[in-house]
Amino acid sequence: MNEHLIEHEEFEAGAASENANCLFEATLAKAGAGGVASIKINEAIHAGLFVVVCDSPFHCRATDAIVGSVTYFKSAHATREEAELAASQCSDEDCEDRYYVLPRVSLPVRKAAPTDDLIPF
């Protein structure tokens, strides 16, 4: 077999597996990135505070591909109004990040309107 062809095939196989390995490492890093933040978020909510959190996309360092999103703790406040104000001020920082307040407002559940099963169509 041609020596140059073997080198070319090895190069192509190595490049593909390197990108796959980078994405796999980024997926593992994403899984561990939100661990400390989720503990802070849960502790603040359990203490009765309103928490501003940030959902931010998590990128692979090598390929710049988006692997997923990570939720980060931003701040904790005594009232929902303070938290909403802080979240709205943070929203101007980065267009990729999404800020919101936890715990979420529970909306009333609407019952479905009664139906008339005797309609012929």
Image (cartoon, rainbow, N blue to C red):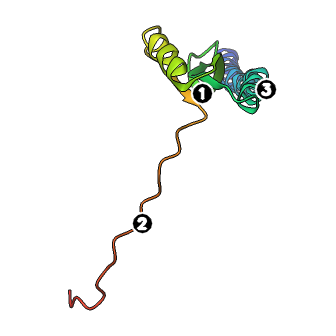
Q: Nearer the viewer, mark 2 or mark 1?
A: 2
Circle 1 residues within 10 Å: few <14, some 14–19, many ≥20: some
Provide the residue designation for mark 1: 69
Query: In the image, what residue occupies the spot 47% across and 16% down?
Result: 85
Where is the C terminus found, in terms of image quarters? bottom left
Q: Residue 9 carries which label?
A: none
Circle 2 residues within 10 Å: few <14, some 14–19, many ≥20: few
Q: Which mark is residue 111?
A: 2
Query: In the image, what residue occupies the spot 78% across and 27% down?
Result: 43
Q: Horizontal and vertical percent for residue 30?
A: 70, 25
Q: Is residue 117 left or right of residue 87?
A: left
* Helix, strand or loop status at disc 1: strand
Amino acid type, label 1: Ser
**Upstream in sequence: badge 1 or badge 3:** 3
Based on the displayed image, in which of its 4 quarters is residue 79 positioned?
top right
Where is the N terminus found, in terms of image quarters? top right
* Helix, strand or loop status at disc 2: loop
Q: Horizontal and vertical percent for residue 108?
A: 47, 53
- Viewer-proximal residue among 70 and 65: 70
- Viewer-proximal residue among 45 and 62: 45
Provide the residue designation for mark 3: 39
Amino acid type, label 3: Ile
**Upstream in sequence: badge 3 or badge 2:** 3
Amino acid type, label 2: Lys
